[in-house]
Amino acid sequence: MTTQLFTNAKVFTGESETGFASAFRTVDGTIDWVGAAEEVEGETAVDLGGRTVLPGLIDSHTHPALIAGTAAAVECFPPAVASVHELVETLRMHAASTGDDWVLGRGFDESKFPERRMPTAEDLDRVSKDRPVLVWRCDAHSAVCNSAALRMAGIDERTPDPEGARFERDDAGRPNGVLTEIAAVAAVASVIPAPSREEQVLAVLRFGEDLASRGIVAVCDLLSTRIDDPLGVFREAEARGLRTRVALYPGWDPEQPLADLDPLDTRGRIRVAGVKVVMDGAYSNRTAWVHEPYPDSCDHGLRLVEDEDVLAAADWARRNGVQLAVHAMGDRTLDRVIELFADREPWLDGVPSVRIEHATLVSEARAERLRAARMSFGIATHTVFFFAEYDGYEKALRAEQVPDAYPIARLYEQIEPLALSSDRPATAWSGADDVMLSIAAAVRRTAYDGTEFGMEAAVTVPQAAMLYTGRARLLSPLEGVGILAPGLDASFAVLDRDVFTVPEDEIASVRVAETWIGGQRVFIR
């Protein structure tokens, strides 16, 4: 039996906003006791030097399978890539360093470019005229490819747009390389050779190391079918040292409705936890499905799936005893989810039967409908979105909508299963899974350039911390994590400064000094 006592610390237990202790004991990787340091004076202990301790953090909406499936892609996130020219140069240097046929990138945000436009095939032809090039936009809903990639995918002026997506075109009707929404991107991405299984496993292991450096010990992968056999890949990574708990949510495809996953393996540290339906697009590129048209346009965005597909996915989730997760960014989409499910009987105990992903515009009335519904709803939302993508939101939201955009304080009061999350790598910022960045944005309500964004929705530091710990654990079946309490995992993060007392403008610079999972230290800075 291995026993460790940790003392002389400021321990945020995650059980409430005011839940603090100063010492805790672990036995064989499990929390045995939490309390006051004075109660254990004289015992042999690890002295934490007065540092702040958080429960191991939960990222409730992220995409490790997407990262594994695009392991060959170079990162093109802001602020490192801030113009079409810098995007082309980044891809050109990447092309020179790899012998692969395809040149791949991910993460650009054209709203931060001085050109204020999407790159096109003509731009990417400067990377290579012969090798196919594709780079995903930061939201992962859209992408751009060069002329060689269009030819390889067989897309020309006669090719019809996919349902719920568009091949953008020039004035002559020829595809210009801009691929708007998932089905259009898939038409090109489907001809890219998949990384080998070994490359996928190694990418997952590197992702786990990144998570440990952020203090993150558990994640939900909200579209795990970006790779083949995600359960097998992640469990192989687990056998080779991955310590992160992972809840997998395969995507619902009406053409292939996951019959091969029946019956599900829903147990263990790596498990299938639900199914995801992507119901609309994203605000930052004005494809979220909305009631009022986007400013200066007649465009209401895109609805990507019909009611029957959403309901079929829900039936599959109910039959298999897992969650339904619905990507619903636009207000019209959120209202449709409420209309479809509010009066239905929940099928799960302990966690919401229906998770709503992103939930950008949530008015008082919508929050009340979710709270009072017969169905059990939970929400995974973000503050890193408006922090990183303010330029896009400024163009996509009407002034009167801003008070309802990511209203974290309102949701905190109304929806108990609630979490902040990163959406990495589908977020326009390098290091989007930096929890302290999200906490700072939740508390300060300012964008990367200092612009204030809905200050009335600000929360306190303890409240924001709860949305990565005690409240986040209520959203998904990631047992054993989220709070420091007897019987749960001895998984925790030690900070280099006290996030609860540093000046607000220093919150984002607080770093994780150590991360422990199951009583073992897996990261030290």
Image (spheres, rainbow, N blue to C red):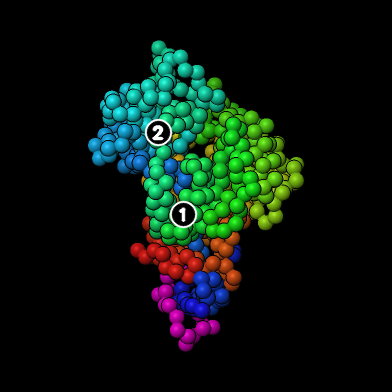
Left-right relation of 204 to 20: left
Amino acid tagged 1: Glu
Measured from the top left, where is residue 270 in percent x and y?
A: 53, 55
* Quadrant of res 171: top left
State the CA–CA distance, disc 2 to disc 1: 24 Å
Q: Which mark is residue 192?
A: 2
Task: Give the residue drawn at x 42%, y 46%.
Answer: 197
Of residues 173 and 289, the one drawn nearer to the viewer in this rendering: 173
Earlier sequence position, callout 2 versus callout 1 = 2
Residue 105 coordinates in the image, percent (x, y): 36, 37
Kindly state the secondary structure of the residue where label 2 is placed.
loop
Residue type pointed to by label 2: Ile
For the point 42% across and 21% down, the residue is 154
Task: Classify 149 as above or below 172.
Answer: below
View extreme (bottom): residue: 42
Magenta residues, start to end? 37-53
**Depth check, front residue: 380 or 306:** 306
| Circle on res. 236 | 1
Residue 6 seen in this snapshot:
yes
